[in-house]
Amino acid sequence: MTNGDYWWEPPAAGTEAEHLLGALDRLRATFRWKADGLDAAGLRTRIGASSLTLGGLLKHLARAEDQMFGTKLSGAPLGAPWDTADWDTDPDWDFNSAADDTPEDLYALWDTTIERSRARLDAALAAGGLDQLVHLAFPDGRHVSLRRLVCDLIEEYGRHTGHADLLREAVDGVVGEDPPAGWHAKSS
C-alpha cells in the first residue's frame, strides 16, 4: 500500500498546521465514508428516539463548514441554502430539511462546501497562519484565533462522526474506524 491509498492520513511528522488540517481531513473522510453511497431511505434512517439521520448530518456539517470558514473566519454572510432558511421557526432546519433533499443534492452540498472550506482555510493560513485573529469575537470583544476555529470544527466532526458510525451500522451493517485503502466518495 502507498500513501495514496490512505490519502486522508495526517502526516507522521509535520508542522502544527499540517497535523491539525490532517486531523480535520481524516475526520471529514471518515464521516463522508460513513455517509457514502446511500439512497434516500438510507440517508433518512433513524435509530431509537434520536431524530439524527446521515442526510441531516451531511447538511448540518456543510453548514458548520460554511459558518466556520465563512462567517466566523471573515464575517462573510452565509449564502444559499442557509440564507433563505427560517431559522427562527426551525432552529434545526439543516437537520430537518434534509429529509426533503435528494441524496445527490445532499452529497453535492457537502462535497462543494468542503472544497470551498479547504480553499478558504488554505488562503487564511497563507495570509497569517494559525495565530491570526479572525472575525469571531466573544461578547467581551476578544477575538478567537484561526487555530480555535480549526479545533472547534475538529470537535464538531468528532461528535458527529461517532453518530454516523451508529447510523451507518443501522442502515446496512457497515462498520470500521477508517475508510478502506483506496476509498474515494462514490456519490459526489
Image (cartoon, helix red, strand yellow):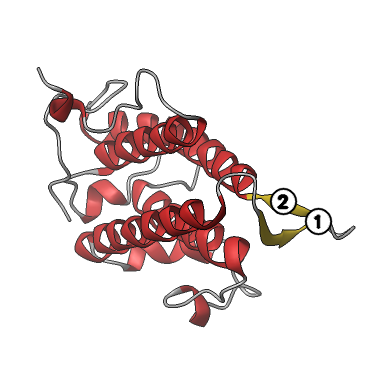
| In-image side of 68 versus 19 (left or right) | right
* Among the two numbered marks 2 and 1 on one chain, the one whose residue lies closer to the N terminus: 1
Residue 81: horizontal and vertical position, in percent?
A: 42, 75
As drawn, 19 above or below 147: above
Q: Which amino acid does label 1 sit on?
A: Phe
Question: Looking at the image, which residue is at 70% across and 60% down?
Answer: 136
Residue 49 visible, this angle? no
Instruction: Provide the residue designation for mark 2.
Output: 144
Q: Around disc 2, counting alpha carbons within 10 Å, would you say few (fewer than 14), some (14 to 19), or many (20 or more)?
A: some
Helix, strand or loop at label 1? It is loop
Furthest toward the front, the residue is 127
Q: Which mark is residue 90?
A: none
Residue 141: horizontal and vertical position, in percent?
A: 85, 60
Q: Around disc 1, counting alpha carbons within 10 Å, would you say few (fewer than 14), some (14 to 19), or many (20 or more)?
A: few
Between residue 133 and residue 44, name the one nearer to us.
Answer: 133
Residue 147: horizontal and vertical position, in percent?
A: 60, 42
Quadrant of the rendered structure where residue 148 is? top right
Q: Residue 138 carries which label?
A: 1
| In-image side of 83 versus 21 (left or right) | right
Question: Looking at the image, which residue is at 51% across and 79% down?
Answer: 83
Residue 63: horizontal and vertical position, in percent?
A: 48, 61
Between residue 167 and residue 112, name the one nearer to us.
Answer: 112
Residue 156 visible, this angle? yes
Question: Looking at the image, which residue is at 31% across and 58% down?
Answer: 115
